[in-house]
Amino acid sequence: MTVKIFIKRKVSANNILELTVLLKQLRSLTLSQSGYIYGETLRRVDAKDECMVISTWRSLKDWNEWLHNEQRIKIQNEIDALLGEKTDYSVYEV
């Protein structure tokens, strides 16, 4: 069953450039991950420091394999350190 992953982050103007580089690295890895269908990044209109990534995966198994990918974890840890908080993930079935 297809799943959508909602990834919420708080971003300040001070770290947007560094974050953009890390997110591009993450996206590049994601594109070659089995089961990845597509993703989009949204910026909240009424809270400019909040962004949401919505990614679609063929199955929960595919998502979990990506979630536990060592390269992804390394980049994600850098993102969390940069932002000063853990990234929030929510998983929904389609």
Image: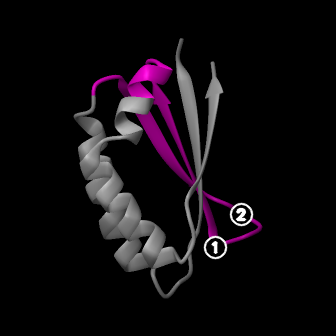
- Residue 6 position within the rendered picture, expressed as x and y whole percent measured from the top left: 60, 43
Pointer 1: what residue?
Answer: 49
Residue 94 falls left or right of residue 80:
right
Quadrant assignment for the C terminus: top right
Q: Is residue 89 magenta?
A: no
Q: Which secondary structure, mark 2?
A: loop
Q: For mark 2, what is the residue?
A: 45
Q: Which disc, if any, is residue 6?
A: none
Does 27 sit above or below residue 82?
above
Q: For the magenta stretch, what is the residue range? A: 34-63
Magenta-colored stretch includes residue 60: yes
Residue drawn at point x = 30 percent, y = 68 percent: 21
In the rendered view, tell whether residue 76 sits above or below residue 94: below
Residue at 25% x, 45% y: name it.
29
SS type, badge 1: loop
Percent position (x, y) of residue 65? Answer: 36, 31
Q: Which residue lies furthest to the top in this view?
A: 1
Residue drawn 56% across and 37% down? 5
Question: What kind of residue is marked 1?
Answer: Asp
Q: Quadrant of residue 31?
A: top left
Q: Quadrant of residue 30 in the image? A: top left
Going by the image, does 17 lie left or right of 47? Answer: left
Q: Where is residue 45 in the image (x, y as percent from the top left)?
A: 71, 63
**Residue type for callout 2:** Val
Task: Report the quarter where the N terminus lies.
Answer: top right
Q: Is residue 85 left or right of residue 80?
A: right
Q: Residue furthest bottom?
A: 14
| Camera-side residue of 74 and 9 | 74
Expressed as whole percent of the image width and height from the top left, the position of residue 18 reads 35, 77
